[in-house]
Image (tube, rainbow, N blue to C red):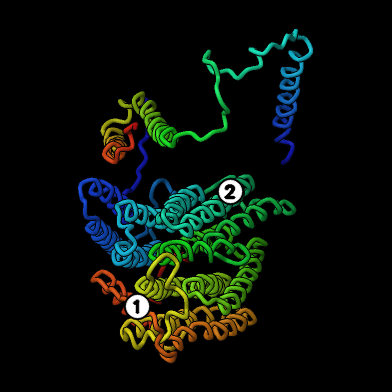
Amino acid sequence: MIEQYLPILILIVASLIFAAIALLAPWYLGPRNPIETKLDTYESGKLPYGDARRQVPIHYYKVAMLFIVFDIEVVFLYPWAILLRDLRMYGLLIMSVFFALLVLGLVYEWMKGALEWN
Amino acid sequence: MGIELPSLNFGALLPVIIVILTSVMVLIFDLALSDKRPLGWISFVGLMFAGGAGWIQQSMEGFDPAFQNMAITDGYTHFFNLIFVVGAGLSVLVALGYLGKKGLQGGEYYAMLLLATSGMMIMAAGTDLMIIFLGLELMSISLYVLAAINRYSRASLEAGIKYFLLGAFASAFFLYGIALIYGASGSTNLNGIGEGLKAVPKGYEALPLFGLGLLIIGFSFKIAAVPFHWWTPDVYHGAPTSVTAFMSVGAKAAGFAALIRVLTVSFGFDGSMFADNWHVAVATLAVLTMTLGNLTALAQNDVKRMLAYSSIAHAGYVLVGVVTGTEQGISAALFYLMAYAFMNIGAFAVISVLEQQDAIGTNLEEYAGLAGHHRVLAMLMAIFMLSLMGFPMLGGFWGKVYVFLAAIEAGWIVLAIIAVLNSGIAAYYYLRVIVHMYMSPVSDQSHAINLNSAMQVALGLAAFGTILLGVMPARIMDLAASSGLFG
C-alpha cells in the first residue's frame, strides 16, 4: 500500500533540493553592494513613510472582503460560458438562479452603503 | 460533445430551499422597512412553510437520494427538520419579544438565524462527509455572528470570539478526520465509506480509526460533550439570551443528527472493530459529559450559566441513547432532542423576559419570590424546570425513560445506572430555581415585566409542546421510530 506513495516522496525531496539550490546559489554567486536606497522598503517608487504596522481604515478590509466574494463567484461564470451550448436550457436556468442571488447580494451591499467611501 | 446532465431532485431538499429563500427575502425587505419586527414574522411564516413542505414530503412514498447521493430525505431527515423548525420558530418568537428591549432588532439577526437553520437541515440530510461539513460551516459561521450580534456588550463579543476560535479549531479536527477516512476507504460518501472499510485489510485499521476519532472530536465540540465543552458556559452566558436558546437546541440537535448518521451508516456494520471502538468511546464521552455537566451546574448561581451546564449534561443523556446503536436507542435520542427543544427554549424564554440589562438579571437571587410578582411566568418556569429534571408526565421525563430503557435493553446496564444517578443529582439545581421562585421572600428589586404578544405565543407553544410530549409521547416516539435510518 505505502509503496504507491514513493513518487510523492521523491517529488518532495526533489522540490526541497531545487528550492535549496535556488535560494543558496544567488547568495553564493551574486555580487553584493548594499546602499541605503536598496535596503529601503519598496513602495512602487514612492518614498516610504512611517511604520507598516499601523492602524488601517476598516474600509480597506470591507472592500477587500466584498471584492473577494464577488471575484470568486464571477469566476464560476467562465466555465459556464464555455459550455453554455452543451448545458442548454438547464444550465441557463441554474445559472440564472445563481446570478440572481449574486445580484441581490450586490443590491444589498449597495443599499446598505458598504460601497460608500468617506 | 454531449454532457450528461445530472438529475438533482431539488424537491427532496425543498425545506432547505424554502428556508434559504426566506432568509434572502428577509435581507431584501430589511432594506425597505424601517420597522424590523415584520421581518421576524416573515421568518416565522417561512419556517412554517418549510415545516409544511417537510410534512408533505413525509406523506409521500419512498426516500429519494438527491444531488447524486449527496443528500437524502428519509424519515430521519424529516424528524430532524421538524426539530429544527420547532427550535428556529420558537427562537424567532423569543427574539421578537427580546431584541426590541435590547435595541438589537434587525434584518441580519433573522437572516443569520434562517441561514443557520438551513445549515442544520443540510447536516441532517447530508449523506456525504463533504456536504455534512458544508452544512456544519453554514450553521457555525452564522452562529458565530449571532453570538456576537450585541456589539455594544463585551460579554457578547467575547462569546462570539471564543465560539469562533474553538469552532474553527473543531472544524479543523473534523476536516482532518474526513481526509484520513477518505485515505483509508477511498470515499467521502457515507455508504461508500462503509463499503470501503470492509475491504481494509487486517492490521491497517489504525488510519480509519484515527480518522473516526477525529470526526467524533469534531462533533463533540458542536454538541458540547465533555471534555470538548469548555467554550459552552462562556458562550451561552455571553450571547444574547434569544441566541443562546437557539444554539443550545439547534446546534446540538444538528451535531447529533450528523454524528448518529455517520456512526450508524459508515461505521455501524456488525462485527467490525470500528463499531466496538466507537461504542466504547461514545460511552466514555456520555459518562464524562453527564457527570461533569451536572456537578458543575450544582455550583452555579447564575440561571443562564446553570442552564449552560445543564445543556452539557443533557447532551450526555442523548449520548447514552447513541451509544446503544440500536434502533430503539436512536429513536429515544431523537425523542429526547425533540422534548429538549421545547423545554429548553421555554426556559431561556423565561430568562429573556426577566433579563433587564446585559448579563444582569440572570442571577438566581433575583428570581426570589417571582411567584408573587408574576404567577404565570413562575408557573411556566416551574414546568420547564420540572421537565428538564425529568418529572413524570412532562416531555423530559419520557425522553429519559426511553433513553435509559434502550440502554438497559442493549446491555449497557452500568451506563444506565450512572445516567439515573445523574438525573438524581440534577434534581437539586432545577428544584433550587423553583424553591427560590416560590418559597423565598420577595426581593426588593421589582421586575418591570414586559410580555409582548410574540413572547406570549413562544412561551405558550413551548409549554404546550412540553406537556403534549409528556401526555402523549407514543405518537412522537412512533414518528422517531419510523425514522428509517435502519431501513
Mark 2 or mark 1, earlier in chain: 2
Give left or right: position of B297 versus B467: right
User: What residue is shown at x 32% (from left), y 59% (from top)?
Assistant: B103
Does the residue at mark 2 contact the one at mark 1 (Cβ under 8 Å)?
no
Q: Is residue B484 visible?
A: no
Residue B312 or B299: which is nearer the viewer? Answer: B299
Q: Please rate how many residues cluster around mark 1, counting C-alpha atoms within 10 Å: few if below 14, some from 14 to 19, many from 20.
A: some
Q: Is residue B395 visible?
A: yes
Residue under mark 2: which chain is it in?
A: B
Coordinates of residue B280 in the picture (x, y in percent): 66, 68
Coordinates of residue A73 in the picture (x, y in percent): 38, 33
User: Does dot 1 land on a helix, a strand or a loop?
Assistant: loop
Q: Please rate how many residues cluster around mark 2, counting C-alpha atoms within 10 Å: few if below 14, some from 14 to 19, many from 20.
A: some
In the figure, A55 relative to B53: above or below?
A: above
User: Does dot 2 land on a helix, a strand or a loop?
Assistant: helix
Give left or right: position of A4 versus B148: right
In the figure, B412 relative to B70: above or below?
A: below
In the figure, B289 relative to B434: above or below?
A: above
The residue that mark 1 highlights is B447
User: What residue is shown at x 71% (from left), y 29% (from top)?
Assistant: A12
Coordinates of residue B251 in the picture (x, y in percent): 46, 61
Q: Amino acid at mark 1?
A: His
Residue B172, labelled with which disc?
2
Compute the Cα span from label 2 to label 1: 45 Å
Q: Amino acid at mark 2?
A: Ala
Q: Quadrant of the N terminus of chain B?
A: top left
Q: Quadrant of the C terminus of chain B?
A: bottom left
